[in-house]
Image (cartoon, rainbow, N blue to C red):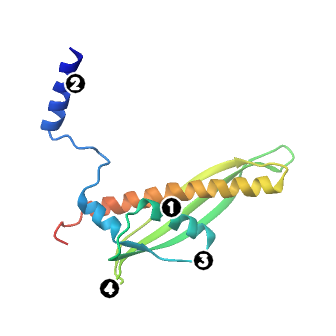
Amino acid sequence: MRKIIVITWLLLMTNCGFKAVYETSNQDNLILRQIEIAHKNDLLHQELRHSLEELLLKQSQKKYILDLDVKSTNADAITSASGNPSRISINVSAKFYLRDIKTNEILKEGSVSSYGEYDVDDNRFANYSSADAIKAELTKILAEKIRNKIITWSISLDPQD
């Protein structure tokens, strides 16, 4: 009986036009393969660039360049009774510009941001390590958000482009 239900469900899903929500078409993959990310010497920018490079597909010939402007801000999330911060909030934001490599025309621009928090410790090195770990995780989240915005933009393109 269970096999019949599974077979029926599979037949219905394949015949009704079901398509996975997060599946990307070949057109989307083509766009992702053709993006080169601009280099800057800022550490936060490099972390975001490496996270994006893990998500984007590699191909030798590039048609687009992705320019990033990354900023990080810290704020006291919670302060103790003595006025010292006991929890720090970090906000990492990025503006991005997807440009045509030949004409330098901006094809897509946008901004993304994400934030995280960590507990303040008496050990200064532990605080630096916590802040760096949070920033690394936030850059991965930003990379996914940027990739998703580029995929959404590429879906609206004419397939003949």
Is 79 in front, or is 137?
137
Q: Which residue is mark 1?
A: 51
x, y percentage for residue 73? 65, 62
Q: Which tag is nearer the camera, tag 1 or tag 4?
A: 1
x, y percentage for residue 41? 60, 77
In whole angstroms, how far apart are the C-alphas of marks 1 and 2?
A: 39 Å
In whole angstroms, how far apart are the C-alphas of marks 3 and 1?
A: 15 Å
Tell me the amino acid under the disc marked 2.
Answer: Val
Is 157 in front, or is 23?
23
Q: Residues within 10 Å of mark 4 (few under 14, many from 20)?
A: few
Q: Secondary structure at mark 1?
A: helix
Give me the residue at 37% from left, 63% from top.
57
Q: Relative to 39, is 73 on the left or the right?
A: right
In whole angstroms, how far apart are the C-alphas of marks 4 and 3?
A: 25 Å
Quadrant of residue 36 within the rendered picture: bottom left
- Determine contact: label 1, label 2, CB under 8 Å: no
In whole angstroms, how far apart are the C-alphas of marks 1 and 4?
A: 27 Å
- Determine contact: label 3, label 2, CB under 8 Å: no
Q: Secondary structure at mark 4?
A: loop
Q: Secondary structure at mark 2?
A: helix
- Whichever of callouts 1 and 2 sits on the residue coming sooner in the sequence is 2
Q: Which residue is mark 2?
A: 6
Q: Which residue is mark 4?
A: 103
x, y percentage for residue 48? 53, 64
Q: Quadrant of the N terminus?
A: top left
In whole angstroms, how far apart are the C-alphas of marks 3 and 2?
A: 54 Å
Q: Which tag is nearer the camera, tag 3 or tag 2?
A: 2
Tell me the amino acid under the disc marked 1.
Answer: Ser
In this view, the residue farthest toward the bottom is 103
In this view, the residue farthest toward the top is 1
Q: Which residue is mark 3?
A: 41
Tell me the amino acid under the disc marked 4.
Answer: Thr
